[in-house]
Image (cartoon, helix red, strand yellow):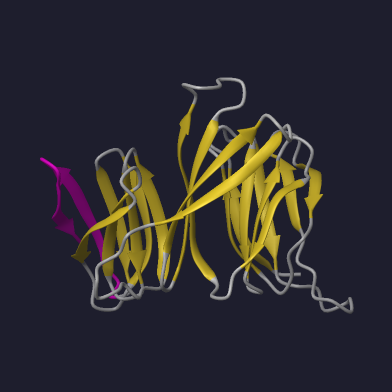
Amino acid sequence: MEISAVAVSSSGKLIATGQKGSVFQKTPEAPIILWSYESKKPLAVLKGMSDCINKLAFSPDDQFLCGISANNMFCIWSVRDGNPIHTRYFEHPLSLAVWGEIITDTNPKQPTYSLITGNINSIFINRLEFDINSMQYLLKTGTCQLPNTGLVRNYTFAATQGDLLLAGTTGGDICVFSVYSTIYRASIPLSGNGIMCGALDGDVLYVGGGDGKVKKVVLVKGDWKLTFEA
């Protein structure tokens, strides 16, 4: 079926492709294929989702892959053996999934992973931690504190930089969150026709808007400022 999502690992050695749900089966299963970039051959087929794969993202060390599907499912797989380690159904579909920092202070061999997910009403700060009792990774989820008036957004892309989460929206702004403090910080309006995509390079954020313009936003003394557009 048609490819609907692609992710490349940080090392560049792995590629994950997700597809639309199959029309040739009774249930519209949407498998994810894990590929070796070097051999150009599939390594594993990851299952558990249907309808359509919307987003895929590798952990920074290539150990895990998370995915969001159109049937409101959220899954995390172990890249090593292809087995799912976490599966959850959400009432509202997720539109944001991005990995944060890896914490190795407590257990370098089984580090803790930061994973941020979000839907139209909420931002979830997750920690993927190794549980000694069960000898497996478990996901612990907390909710980010939002403004008292609420924050309703459809997210189009997200990137993390240390404590900061930057999330572009269909409303045309960049929402800034603190991952460590689990709190909403600010909103930066950039485009009247929504933000379609973005890429973070150090202290520079490049944004593609629905108005056909590319904008450069730079972090200066703790504040993000628009410095160029074309």
Question: In the figure, is residue 167 to the left or right of 220?
Answer: right
Percent of width and height locating residue 210: 33, 74
Q: Residue at x 58, y 37 (%)?
A: 129
Looking at the picture, does residue 185 appear above or below residue 42?
below
Q: Nearer the viewer, residue 83 or 40?
A: 83
Q: Position of residue 167 (x, y in %)?
A: 35, 59
Residue closer to the observer: 136 or 30: 136
147 above or below 220?
A: below
* Numbered-mark total: 0
**Which residue is painted at 58% across and 36% down in the image?**
12
In this view, the residue farthest toward the front is 133
Q: Residue at x 77, y 61 (%)?
A: 48
> In terms of image quadrants, where is residue 37?
top right
Name the quadrant of the C terminus.
Answer: bottom left
* Residue drawn at (50%, 22%) of the image: 106
- Give residue 57's position: percent from left, percent from top: 56, 50
Give the magenta range: 211-230
Q: Quick one: 75 or 32, which is closer to the camera?
A: 75
Left or right of residue 50, residue 144 in this image: left
Q: Is residue 67 magenta?
A: no
Which is the main secondary structure of the residues drawn in magenta?
Answer: strand
Q: Quadrant of residue 219?
A: top left
**Residue 71 percent location from the top left of the image:** 66, 74
Asked whether 218 falls inside the magenta stretch, the response is yes
Q: Quadrant of the N terminus?
A: bottom right
